[in-house]
Amino acid sequence: MHEETATETSALVDATDQSSEEHRLVEEDVSRGLHYWIHPRVWLPPLVAFGLLALGWQLYAVHNRFIIPTVPQILTQLVDHPGLFWRNLLVTLQEAVVGASIGMLAAFVLAMGMCQVRLVERALMPLAVMINVTPIIAIAPVLVLAFGFGMTPKYIVTAVIVFFPFLINSLTGLRSSDPQAHDVFTTLHASKWEILLRLRLPSSLPFLFAAARICVPLSVVGAVVAEYVAPGKASGLGSLIETAMSLSDLKTVYASVLVLALLGIGLSAVVVVLQRRLLGWHQTAPRRP
Amino acid sequence: MGLDVLGVSKTFDTRKGRVAALRDVSLRVGRGRFVSLIGPTGCGKSTLLRIVAGLVEADGGTVSIFGEPPERATAAKHVGFVPQSPALLPWRTVLDNVRVPFQVNRKADSVLGRRFRDPVEVLESFGLGDVLHSRPDQLSGGMQQKVAIARAFVFDPSILLMDEPFSALDELTRERQRHELLDIWQSDQKTVLFVTHSVPEAVALSDAVVVMSAQPGRVRAVIPVNLPRPRGELVEATDVFHDLERRVRSELRVAWNDNHA
Ligand SMILES: Nc1ncnc2c1ncn2[C@@H]1O[C@H](COP(=O)(O)OP(=O)(O)OP(=O)(O)O)[C@@H](O)[C@H]1O
Ligand SMILES: [Mg+2]
C-alpha cells in the first residue's frame, strides 16, 4: 500500500517534470560544476520576479515620497555605508545561527527521548506547548534581566522560536519509519537504540530538513525580535532598524530590511544545498530546475 | 524438530468489538520443509506468521522454533522475516541493506558454529551481482523483493517466514520469482513458512499446503504435496500438479463458504 502510493507520487512528479530525460541531462550538467549557474533557466525566473517587485515599489514610491524611499535611494544607502550594514549583519547572523542551532539540537534530542520513552513525551510535551504559546516578546525583557545585555538572551529568544516546530517535526519524522522495516529489525532482535540509530534517525531526515527550511529563516525573525525587545549593545539589523525608525531614517530602515531578506534567502539556500547533498535518496530532495 | 505451533489462539480488541483472529491453530513444519499457508483474506495468516516471528503475542497455545519460544529464537537470530513489502532502507545501497542483519544484535553472532554468508556472494547467487551498489528505488519491484529475501537469507536463520512476498508483482515476474526461490531453496533446504494467496504458487513451492478458514481463523485442511524435487517450471504443466491445485481450490472454496454461510 505504502509503496504503491509512493510510486504513484513519484510518477506524478515525473509527469510534471516535462521531460525526465532533459531533467537528467541538467542533473549531469550540475555535477560538472559552474556550468549550471550560467543557465538562464536558473537565474532568470527569480530575477524577473524581483525586477517586477522593484518596479512596482518604485512606481509606488515616486508617488509617496514621504512614506517610502525609492529603490535607488535604498541602494545608495547600502553602497554609501557598507561597513555599517555588514557589521550589523554579522551580529544578526551570529544570533540566528547560534540560536537556531541550539534550539534545533535541543528539540531533536528531546524528540529522540520522547520517541524512545513514552513517559518522557507525556511528561514534557505540555511543557513544550507552554513554551510555544508564551509570548516571547513578553518574556524577553525578563531574559535581559536574568542574563544581561550580552548575546545570551538573544540566543535564547531565537532558540525558543525555532524549538517547537522542530520538536514536532522531529517527533513525526522519527515515528515515520516503515512499520514493516521495523518488523524486520524486531525479528533480528535489534535494540531500541539500534532501531533509533539505523532506522528511525535516517527516516526522520526528510522531516528534519523540511523543518529546517522553516526554522532557519524563522531564526532570523527571532534574532530581529530579540534585538528589538532586548536591545543590549544595540547592534544587529533589528537594533539598526529600531534606531533608524526613531530617527525617521526610512532609507536605513528599508536598506536593513533588504539586507535581512538577503540574509534569509542565503541561509535558506544553505539548507537546500545540504538537503540536496544528504537526501539524494529521498523524493522530497529539491530538484534542480 | 522444526516449527511447532500448538493450539494457538489470538483475539484482537478493536473499536468495533472483538475479532477472533485465530482459534486453536496447530501446525508443524519439519526441518528443511517448505509449508505454505493459504486462506481467505482476514483468516489470520499474517497474524499467525507474526506470532511465530515474535512480533505479536498469542493469547494461548505454544510456539516452538527448534525447541525455543519465539522470543528466544529471535534473540539468537534464528528467524528470518520477509514482509509483504520489501521494506528496504532507501538511503542504503542494496549491499548495505543486506548487511543490516550483521549490524544489529551483535551479541547473537558470537555463538559458536554459526555460518554467516558473504552478502556479496548471496546477492550474486540471487542474480543481483550487477546492482550491489544501486539504491533500492533504482530497482524493479521484483528485484527489491529478492533483496529483501537475500537480507533474510544472509545470516543463515534456522527458519524463514515470508508474508506474501510476491503479492505486489505482476503475474509473469511472480512466476519467475517463484522458480528462482525454488532454486535458492533447493540448494539450501531451509525450513520455511510461506503465506500466499496464489494456489499455483503454494503448490509449486511447498511440501504441504495448509488451508485456513476465517472467523475465527483456523486450519481447515493440510494437503501434502508429493511432487518430486528439484521442481522445474515444467512441473506446473503436469496432471499431478493440476490435481493438487484442484484439491487446494476446493478446500479454499469450502473455507470461503464457511465465512459466508
Ligand atoms: N493489530 C490488529 N488489531 C486489530 N485487529 C487485527 C490486527 N491484526 C489483525 N487483525 C484482525 O485479525 C484478522 C486476521 O488478520 P490477518 O492480517 O492475520 O489476516 P490475513 O489472513 O493475513 O489477511 P490477508 O490475506 O488479507 O493478508 C482480521 O480480521 C484483522 O482485521
Ligand atoms: Mg496478511
Image (tube, coloured by chain):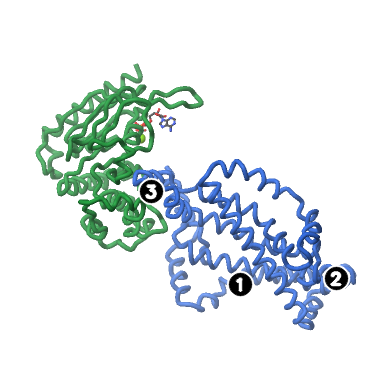
Chain colours: A blue, B green
Image spot of residue B16 (x, y percent): 49, 24
Establish if B19 lies above or below B231. above
The answer to whether mark 2 and mark 1 are in CB contact below 8 A is no
Which of the two discs, 2 and 1, sits closer to the camera?
A: 2
Quadrant location of the N terminus of chain B in the rendered image: top left
Label 3 and label 2: CA atoms lie apart by 58 Å
User: What residue would you read off at disc 2?
Assistant: A243
Q: Which mark is residue A190?
A: 3
Residue A127 as seen in the image, left or right of residue A114: right
Quarter where residue A32 is shown: bottom left
Q: Quadrant of residue B35?
A: top left
Reply above or below: A286 against A77.
above
Badge 2 sits on which subunit? Answer: A
Cβ at disc 1 under 8 Å from ligand 1: no
Comparing B164 with B26, the one in front is B26
Q: Chain of mark 3?
A: A
Residue type, mark 3 in image: Ala
| In the image, farthest residue toward the left | B228
How far apart marks 1 and 3 lie (CA) works out to: 51 Å
Badge 1: chain ID: A
